[in-house]
Image (spheres, grey):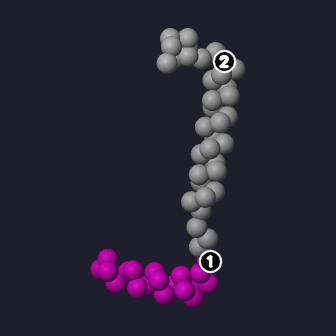
Amino acid sequence: MTLRHTFLGPLEKQRLSFLLEKSISREAQMCQVNVPKMSTNQNVLVREFLWMFFI
């Protein structure tokens, strides 16, 4: 890498920022996991079950 590549101008910084944001967004979309929403009854049961371990 030459010295001229280490200094980025405003346009290069903006482009780099855009590309980093885009790649992070893609990564986040790939890592998303669909978690089914629990019903209220299930929430209560889970809370009560977990509460037993904290007493």
Image point (46%, 81%), residue name: 47
Comparing 27 with 36, the one in front is 27
**Residue picked out by circle 1:** 37
x then y, percent, for residue 51? 38, 80
For the residue marked with disc 1, what is the amino acid? Lys
x then y, percent, for residue 39? 61, 84
Q: Secondary structure at mark 2?
A: helix
Mark 2–mark 1 Cα distance, whole angstroms, equals 45 Å
Q: Secondary structure at mark 1?
A: loop
x then y, percent, for residue 10? 66, 18
Q: Point out the tag, 2 or 1, that comes first from the N-terminus.
A: 2
Q: Residues within 10 Å of mark 1 (few under 14, many from 20)?
A: few
Q: Is residue 19 left or right of residue 41?
A: right
**Residue picked out by circle 2:** 10
Q: Is residue 38 magenta?
A: yes
Q: Specify the segment rendered in magenta.
A: 36-55
x then y, percent, for residue 24? 59, 45
Asked if 35 appears above or below 21 in the picture, the reply is below
Q: Quadrant of residue 41?
A: bottom right
For the residue marked with disc 2, what is the amino acid? Pro
Q: Quadrant of residue 52?
A: bottom left
